Image: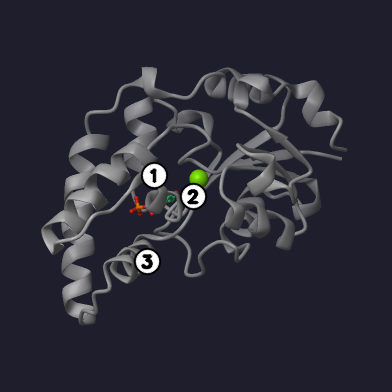
Amino acid sequence: QIKACLFDLDGVIVDTAKYHYIAWKELASNLGFEFTEEDNERLKGVSRMTSLNILLEIGGITLSDEEKHRLAEKKNENYRTFILKMQPDEILDGAKEFLQELKAKGIKIALGSASKNAMTILERLELTELFEAIIDGTKVTEAKPNPEVFLKGAEALNVDPSECVVFEDAEAGVEAALAGNMKCVGIGSPVVLGKANLVIDGLHQMTYEKLMELN
Ligand code: BG6
Ligand code: MG
């Protein structure tokens, strides 16, 4: 019996990838190499430090841990100038409506995001109050595909993982959900998210009835 839904943030509720892209591209440019939109795809769902490591690998650059932390911090400052200006109209189509529908039907809702900026983003979008539990990058030690972020969400909602459905746009996130013994709805391409129980284009296609069909 499905009792709870756990949502990834970036790419599911809001498109922050475009801001991450601008900030990573600028960093790469300062380091003297090109960072493309295709490269940016590899950073979806991946933690900040792992993202930097992938970027440096693309540029063929090796740096000390100290220097890496400095650059990650710099990138984040740049990224935050964008998210601090976000408005509620940037919420992806149908996301807020689906969250409200779930709430009305008594389904519990939690956030399960790798981002350390999740609280800032939810506040800017005026969505914080809809979530009963918020597990973000500041609360986990293991990155997706490790299921930690979702297991902590289930625990906070006081439900069994088998009673949870996860909404994810990243392959690593789908794997995390399944590894946690949860059902998963993929948001995006069936080619990338084929392991999910259902794949849709966006939350505008989701309803309580479709959720119950996953039972
Ligand atoms: C994920 C994004 O949600 O959060 C990744 O998909 C991002 O692209 C990661 O790198 C970490 O985000 P932040 O905000 O902590 O740098
Ligand atoms: Mg995501």
Q: Find out whether the residues at labels 3 and 2 contact each other: C-beta distance under 8 Å.
A: no
Cβ of mark 2 under 8 A from ligand 1: yes
Residue at position x 31%, y 45% in the image: 20
Q: Looking at the picture, does residue 120 appear above or below residue 67?
A: above
Mark 1 or mark 2, which is nearer the start of the sequence? 2
Instruction: Say which of 49 and 4 sits in front.
Output: 49
Rounded to the nearest angstrom, the CA distance separating label 3 from label 2 is: 19 Å
Helix, strand or loop at mark 1:
helix
Residue 31 as seen in the image, left or right of residue 151:
left
Q: Quadrant of residue 124?
A: top left
Q: What color scheme is it? A: one colour
Check disc 3 and report the residue beneath it: 54
Check disc 2 and report the residue beneath it: 113
In the rendered image, residue 182, in percent from the top left (x then y), is placed at 75, 52
Rounded to the nearest angstrom, the CA distance separating label 2 from label 1 is: 7 Å
Question: Identity of the amino acid at label 3?
Answer: Ile
Question: Identity of the amino acid at label 1?
Answer: Ala
Mark 2 or mark 3, which is nearer the start of the sequence? 3
In the rendered image, residue 37, in percent from the top left (x then y), is placed at 36, 45
Q: Quadrant of residue 132?
A: top right
Q: Find out whether the residues at labels 2 and 1 contact each other: C-beta distance under 8 Å.
A: yes
Question: Identity of the amino acid at label 2?
Answer: Ser
Q: Looking at the picture, does residue 64 appear above or below residue 145?
A: below
Check disc 1 and report the residue beneath it: 118
